[in-house]
Amino acid sequence: MSPKTTARAGKAGSKAQRDAATFLSQQAREHDVKFIRIWFTDILGFLKSFAITIDSLEKALEEGVGVDGSSIESFARAEEHDMVAVCDPKTFQVLPWRPRENAVARMFADIHHMDGRPFDGDPRHCLKRQLKRAAQLGYTFYVGPEIEFFYFKSAERPEPTDQGGYFDLAPLDTGSDMRRQTVLTLEELGIPVHSSHHEVAPGQHEIDLKHMDALTMADSVMTYRLTAKEIAQQHGVHATFMPKPIEGQDGSGMHVHQSLFHASSKGGGERNAFYDPRDKHQMSPIAKHYVAGLLRHAREMAIVTNQWVNSYKRLVTGYEAPTHILWGQKNRSALVRIPMNKAGRAENARAEFRSPDPACNPYLAFSVMLAAGLQGIQKKYPLPKSTEGDVVSWSREEKAMAGVEELPTSLGEAIEVAKKSKFLRDTLGPQIFHSLIENKEIEWEKYRHHISQLELKTGLSNL
C-alpha cells in the first residue's frame, strides 16, 4: 500500500481503528487466535478468503490488506487490479470447527480502491448502497431467510443420507444430529437460529435464521453455508445448496421474510412500517406498495435471485416453488405470501418472497429485493388483487386477463430480461451489472453446448 493511501486510511478514523485493534487483540489472546481469515465474496456469491497472522491484525485494521480485485469478477475475470480489503471488526468471530489451540478467527471485509473509495464491484458495498437509500427514507431493512439444503453421502452423486420427509423425526431423519451441531455452531458464531427441521425431499433439511438487519444477515448466510458444509464433512457426508439436485423431488429454496421498520414517534424504538391492524391483510399502504414493487420487478431480479442454470429446474410446476408472479396470504404457490399474523403482533408483519434459492449471492439478492420494494413505495405502485387459487390450470387467456405473468423459465430468458432492465442496472451499478451478465452468458453458453444423458437416451437410437 502506498504511503498516500496509508495516510488517508489512518486519517479516516485512527482512534476507532486503534480501539478496535486493542479490543480484537484482547479477544484473540483470550481465545489463543493465531490466524485470521479475511472473507469477501465474488459476484456469484462464492466465498473468497486469505489469512493473516495475529501479528498483522493492527496494521490490517489501520491500513487494510492488499488484494487482487479481479478475484471478485469470478469466471469473467479481466486484467488484475490492485484493491484493498478493509476489515469490518464487528464481524470478528472465532471459527468453532478449527482447533482451539492456535485458533482461527474470521472477519468480513469491504473491497476498496487504493485511494480509499469503495469498489463498485463489491457485492457487500452494493447492499450497503441500498441500505443507505432505505435509511435516507427513514427505514431499516430486516430479513429472515428459510434456507434449505441437502445432505448427500458424497459430492460425486446425489444419494441422500436418509429417506425422511417433511418434519420427520428419527430414525428416518438421520441428519438431525448434524442439524443440531450446525445450529449450535451457528449460535456460537453469534448467529441466532429460529428453528430447524427435515424438509420434503429425502436428505433435505432446513435451518431458519432469526430476522436481523440485511447486512448482518448477508454475512450470516455466507457463514451458514460454510458451517453446514464443514459440519457435514466432519460426519463424512456432503452438504449442498444446489437448487435442484434430484430429479422428481422438491428443490431447495431460500424464502426471504422481509419488512421495513422506522423510528417510532411514541416512546422511541422502531415500528414496523408494514403493519396496519385496520386492513384485511394487516398490510399498511407502505407494505402494499413494497409488495407491488417485488411483483413488478420479479422477472428482472431473477438473474440475481435464481442465477444458475439449475435454478430453473426448481422453478417448475408440480412442486412447491413459485412459477407465476402473484401474491396471496394462504396461497403456497404465490411468489409473495403475506403470512397470517396474530392480532396486535405488529413486529411480525412481513412479506415472504419465495423464488430465491440458497445458491444466490445474498448481498445482491437482498439488494434487488429492497430496491424493488423501495421503488414500489416511492412510485406508489398499485398492488394487484391477491390470488388464493391455483393458477397453473388457468389458460393463457385467463392469466392475461388477470395480469398474471410467469417467472423466467430458463437462465437464458432471465439474461435477456436482465439486459433490458434499467432498474437492475441502477440497483447493481454498471460494474456488477455487466460482470454478472457476462458471467451468466458464459454459463448459459456452456449449458447450450452440453449434450445431456436425456438427449442421448431419447435420440441416439431413435433418430
Image: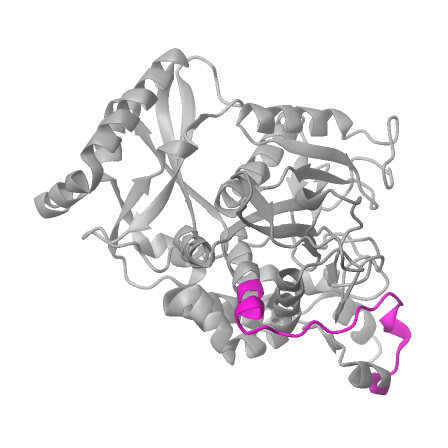
Q: Is residue 423 above or below residue 196?
A: below
Residue depicted at x 80% and y 50%? 340
Q: How many marks?
A: 0
Q: Is residue 446 visible?
A: no
Does residue 380 show up magenta in the picture? yes
Q: Find residue 233 and report its image quarter.
A: top right
Residue depicted at x 86% and y 72%? 392
Q: Quadrant of the C terminus?
A: bottom right
Q: Point out the residue furthest to the left here.
A: 3
Q: Position of residue 37 (x, y in %)?
A: 38, 32
Q: Position of residue 91 (x, y in %)?
A: 42, 33
Looking at the image, what colour scheme do you see? one colour
Left or right of residue 45, residue 118 in this image: left
Q: Find residue 229 and report its image quarter.
A: top right
Q: Quadrant of the N terminus?
A: top left
Q: Position of residue 28 (x, y in %)?
A: 36, 18
Q: Is residue 452 visible?
A: yes
Q: Which stretch did the figure color magenta?
A: 373-397
Does residue 354 show up magenta in the picture? no
Q: Position of residue 77 (x, y in %)?
A: 37, 61
Q: Point out the residue furthest to the front here.
A: 266
Residue depicted at x 80% and y 29%? 174
Residue depicted at x 62% and y 28%? 231
